[in-house]
Image (cartoon, rainbow, N blue to C red):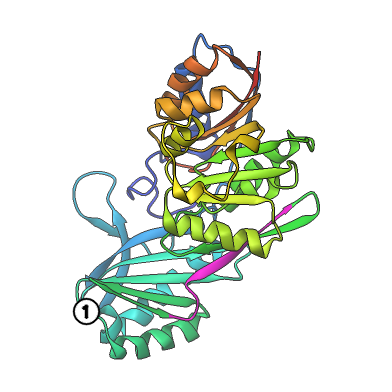
């Protein structure tokens, strides 16, 4: 990657040429699955630069201004970043200008310690959050409004117990699948897919595996509805579970905006939903859902790095088809040891969601033996 700080900045944990770092990660993945019967695995490479649609930078206060910075790869301290080619093109092109604008206005730079951004892949929308060690007030709002006007962005200010919003606090991500445009609202601060290019590849890969089926669909850890919405066209009814309130609220908005009226959303943990399915514990938030009438042919799970709990694992093991999306190949291998007792892996793919880091996203599709 053509970056003047490549190898010094800790933002890229693998400062290697792109093909080399991808090869290293895929080899590590297959080492973890040595001895496990995986089918031929598709590998989806990322763009080599301008792939991140969200990022976090510490603010480095210098004499006469501020600079955006990242931690150093070695040792303590930070390194000033004038441009970061890993970031969305629109943000990268404006990084230094934003830092200069903030540095010229005390109401914006005093006690500012972090700047976060969220942008759409098509570069139409962007939100910048400024995070402070001091209270912010109307004086800040006036300067932030000028900041937003200058760069045509939404601006959010945060300090302890205070959140002020100038303009929008969300962006709209648009994804085209088989000619249909799906529109997703991403709210700043909530989870969103950081690599829009790879997310598009993931959605296409999963969507293409399914023919419309006269049955229902269960999704655990649905987030903002990233996978839920397109798959709503493949099944009769969908039940989508998410514990995070902000993510679930966004998922409901996204479903309405995309005319998906066959999805039942519930805010609860995957483990609690498994308890409800097993009738070991009733939940008032499921009172409008007839669980006995649900015929879940397929389950999709996208758990955190620690993988699935035992109750959730047993729940999905009773489905005909399982889609398991994982950000941690070690816990995926652990869970597949159990699932392979009843299912076989029929498709697998690796997605380089986080280039120049050790992380890699994977997806396996299992069908009952």
Q: Position of residue 35 (x, y in %)?
A: 51, 8
Which residue is painted at 42% across and 83% down in the image? 147
Q: Nearer the viewer, residue 200 or 365?
A: 365
Residue 201 found in image quarter:
top right
Label 1: which residue? 135
Which residue is painted at 54% across and 56% down in the image? 50
- Residue with the most extreme top position: 35
Task: For residue 359, say whether it is visible.
Answer: no
Dominant SS of magenta comes to strand
Report helix, strand or loop for mark 1. loop
Where is 181 relative to 132, above or below?
above
Q: Position of residue 82 (x, y in %)?
A: 39, 65
Query: Is 126 on the left-hand or right-hand side of 365?
Result: left
Quadrant containing the C terminus in the rendered view = top right
Q: Nearer the viewer, residue 252 or 47?
A: 252
Query: Is 8 on the left-hand or right-hand side of 282?
Result: left
Q: Position of residue 172 (x, y in %)?
A: 59, 66
Report the span colored magenta: 166-176
Q: Position of residue 46 (x, y in %)?
A: 58, 43
Where is 339 relative to 302, above or below?
above
Residue 259 found in image quarter:
bottom right
Q: Is residue 264 magenta?
A: no
Which residue is painted at 75% across and 37% down in the image? 208
Residues packed near mark 1 inside 10 Å, few (<14), some (14 to 19) or many (20 plus): some
Where is 52 relative to 151, above or below?
above
Which residue is painted at 43% across and 63% down in the image? 83
Q: Nearer the viewer, residue 198 or 6?
A: 198
Q: Is residue 169 magenta?
A: yes
């Amino acid at each position: 990657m053509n970056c003047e700080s490549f190898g010094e900045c800790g933002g890229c944990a693998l400062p290697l040429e792109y093909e080399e770092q991808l090869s290293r990660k895929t080899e590590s993945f297959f080492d973890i699955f040595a001895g496990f019967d995986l089918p031929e695995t598709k590998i989806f490479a990322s763009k080599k630069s301008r792939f991140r649609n969200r990022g976090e930078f510490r603010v480095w206060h210098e004499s006469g201004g501020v600079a955006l910075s990242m931690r150093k790869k070695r040792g303590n301290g930070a390194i000033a970043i004038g441009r970061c080619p890993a970031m969305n093109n629109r943000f990268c092109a404006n990084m230094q200008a934003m830092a200069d604008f903030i540095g010229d206005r005390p109401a914006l730079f005093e006690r500012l310690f972090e700047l976060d951004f969220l942008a759409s892949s098509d570069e139409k929308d962007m939100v910048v959050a400024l995070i402070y060690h001091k209270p912010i007030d109307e004086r800040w709002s006036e300067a932030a409004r000028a900041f937003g006007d200058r760069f045509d962005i939404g601006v959010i200010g945060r300090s302890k117990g205070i959140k002020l919003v100038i303009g929008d606090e969300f962006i709209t991500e648009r994804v085209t699948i088989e000619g249909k445009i799906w529109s997703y609202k991403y709210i700043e601060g909530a989870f969103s897919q950081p690599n829009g290019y790879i997310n598009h590849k993931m959605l296409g890969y999963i969507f293409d595996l399914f023919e419309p089926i006269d049955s229902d669909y269960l999704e655990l850890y649905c987030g903002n509805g990233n996978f839920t919405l397109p798959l709503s066209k493949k099944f009769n009814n969908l039940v989508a579970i998410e514990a995070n309130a902000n993510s679930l609220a966004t998922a409901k908005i996204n479903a309405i905006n995309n005319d998906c009226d066959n999805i039942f959303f519930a805010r609860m943990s995957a483990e609690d939903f498994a308890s409800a399915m097993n009738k070991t514990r009733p939940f008032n938030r499921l009172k409008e859902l007839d669980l006995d009438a649900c015929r879940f042919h397929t389950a999709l799970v996208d758990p955190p790095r620690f993988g699935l709990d035992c109750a959730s694992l047993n729940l999905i093991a009773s489905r005909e088809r399982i889609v398991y999306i994982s950000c941690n190949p070690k816990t995926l291998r652990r869970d597949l040891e159990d699932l392979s007792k009843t299912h076989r892996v029929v498709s697998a793919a690796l997605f380089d969601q986080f280039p120049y880091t050790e992380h890699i996203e994977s997806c396996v599709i299992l069908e009952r033996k």
